[in-house]
Amino acid sequence: MTPKPTRVTNRIRTLRTERGDLTQADLAEKLGVTRQTVIAIEQGKYSPSLEMAFQIARVFDVPLDDVFHYGEGDAN
Amino acid sequence: MTVTERTTIVGSVLGLITFIAYWTVIIVRALTDDLPFVDVEWQGPMLAAILVGGALYAISYGLISWQARGTRRSDERDYEIQRYAESAGAGLAGLGSLAALIMLTLDVDTFWVATTLFTLGYLGSLVNSGVTIAAYQQGMP
Amino acid sequence: MNNSKHNLPREPHRPADDEPTVMGMDERAAWVQIFAFAITTIAYLAVVTPRVANDPIDEVEWVVPMLWALGLSILSVIVGSIIAGIGGAIGLTMRGLDVDTELSSDSRDKDIARHARLRTYWATPVVALGALILAMLDVDTFWIGTFVFVISSIGAIADAVVRIRAYRRGFVA
């Protein structure tokens, strides 16, 4: 049973290097989650809650749809 | 008020009436026949409670839905609230099942086993209704 | 364990990106749940089935096996989780990773637990209603007890399976 397909993709990996060279561990610490959760989000294996999505955007100091993209296909 | 809220309230009221009716019959039988509870013929009333209560609920659900015909009936929010509330109610029902299992091992009379299942199942449905209404009025966690 | 290949044990360090890590605590708990309930249920059925085959139903001695099964399933969940936790901590220490940041429960674990609960709660009302109907039909207590235990175990296993799938293949809320 594959997970429900989602059209939400994210650029977290790119943003981490672009904005402050954050490692997954750094981002996890800022968000208060485990590193595995950050990995899962980046790989599209976990869809963060709306609250966490905003928190992620805030960490990078960018608008929400600079981080998450809703549409067909592409991401990073 | 949404269709779901209305059916939930009706369901709670019907549930309460059914529950009270069942116990009234049992108590009356126990008193008039001068029997201890475990010897009362409880299976009939129990079956009637479930069937009649279920039928009344189905009828009222149909009426309320028919009243709201044409409007969009169930969306994602309704579905989510329904699932959330049902899982909340299931907790109590599960406790009832565990208690029933332990009673069975202790060789307690099936009357009490059935009573536990029935009562905690009913309380679970109350929790379900309460959580549903609260979720619609105040939002879901 | 081929130490030279994996370069273990390592000094405590901050993990690099995508550095492999151990299975999280909640996923471990799910595996423990599967094993605990599957094994106790199978053991109970193994003990009880020959008795059903040989004795008339109302003489089947099922209570003692049931109490054992109940007690052991609860006990093995607790003990199994403790052991799994220790194993995780050891694995992390060998890899030089911090237990708190890699093994603990976060909001994703709560989300997955809730997701699994929402998908598998059906087992509970099925058990309660089914047991009630069986009681009404005056079926032997053996059948009622066995029904409650087996279906509840299936529900618990289903819950754990949904959780593990969510961890491995991912899930969308």
Image: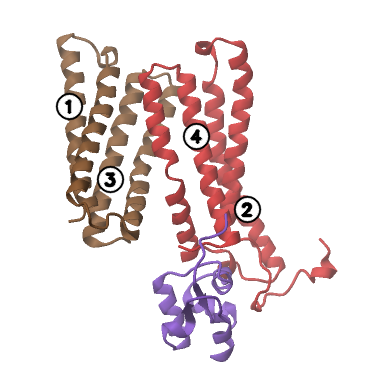
Chain colours: A purple, B brown, C red
Task: Same chain for labels 3 and 4? Say yes or no.
Answer: no
Mark 2 chain: C
Query: The disc labelled 1 sits on which kind of residue?
Result: Ala
- Which image quadrant: the N terminus of chain C? bottom right
Task: Same chain for labels 1 and 4? Say yes or no.
Answer: no
Mark 1 chain: B
Q: On screen, A40 above or below C82?
A: below
Q: On screen, C129 above or below A16?
A: above
Closer to us: A38 or C11:
A38
Nearer to us: label 1 or label 2: 1
Residue at disc 3, secondary structure: helix
For marks 1 and 4, give the CA distance: 31 Å
Query: The disc labelled 2 sits on which kind of residue?
Result: Ala
For marks 3 and 4, give the CA distance: 23 Å
Query: The disc labelled 4 sits on which kind of residue?
Result: Ile
- Residue positioned 26% across, 52% down in the render: B132
Q: Nearer the N terminus, badge 1 or badge 3?
A: 1
User: Residue C156 at x, y = what percent?
Assistant: 51, 43
Q: On screen, A70 above or below C103?
A: below
Task: Same chain for labels 1 and 2? Say yes or no.
Answer: no
Nearer to us: label 1 or label 3: 1
Q: Is there CB contact under 8 Å for labels 3 and 4?
A: no
Residue A29 seen by the camera: yes
The circle on residue C84 is 2
The circle on residue B127 is 3
